[in-house]
Image (tube, grey):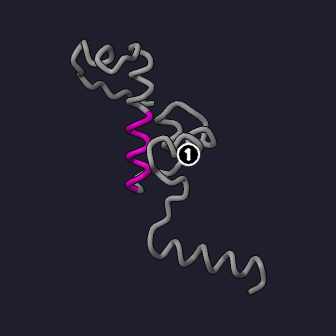
Amino acid sequence: MKVLLIPIPDELPQMLKMSDEEFQAEARMLLAVKLYEMGKVTAGIAAKIAGVDRLTFLSLLSRYGVPAINLRGDEVSGEIEAAKELIGS
């Protein structure tokens, strides 16, 4: 796995009332959430970035105001049609 290094002010974690480890975990999660929200990565890839399993990632999305189901325009129509076929409508 690649590593991304981002310089931050030394005092930033303390300003946010976080330990260095808490800040690092939060930064990873924020990156993962935003990439997922933008449709750039799947929930599985986002979970790897965040350092959690997929179900945990999906359950944490609500904290950030991001829906767990991240479908775009034509994907919604396709999912509705597939659901109708499953129930026999």
Instruction: Determine crowd level at label 1: few under 14, some 14-19, many 20+ residues with C-alpha closer than 10 A.
Output: some
Stretch in magenta: 29-38
In the image, taking residue 86 as reference, residue 75 lies left or right, namely left
Q: Position of residue 20 (x, y in %)?
A: 38, 14
Give the labeled residue for mark 1: 44
Q: Position of residue 18 (x, y in %)?
A: 39, 17
Residue found at x 60% / y 73%: 79
In the displayed structure, 4 sits above or below 31; it is: above
Magenta segment: does it hold 11? no
In the displayed structure, 15 sits above or below 52; it is: above
Figure quadrant of the N terminus: top left
Q: Position of residue 85 (x, y in %)?
A: 72, 81
Instruction: Looking at the picture, tell me which residue is in the foreground, 5 or 62.
Output: 62
Q: Position of residue 86 (x, y in %)?
A: 75, 76
- Could you tell me which secondary element the residue under label 1 belongs to? helix
In the displayed structure, 1 sits above or below 42; it is: above
Looking at the picture, which amino acid does disc 1 mark?
Gly
Image mark count:
1
Residue found at x 43% / y 16%: 21
Q: Which image quadrant is residue 3 in?
A: top left
Magenta segment: does it hold 34? yes
Q: Which image quadrant is residue 52 in?
A: top right
Residue found at x 39% / y 22%: 23
Residue found at x 43% / y 40%: 32
In the image, taking residue 42 as reference, residue 5 lies left or right, namely left
In the image, taking residue 11 as reference, residue 79 lies left or right, namely right
Figure quadrant of the C terminus: bottom right
Please identify the residue farthest to the bottom as the structure is shown.
89
Would you say the magenta stretch is mainly helix, strand or loop? helix
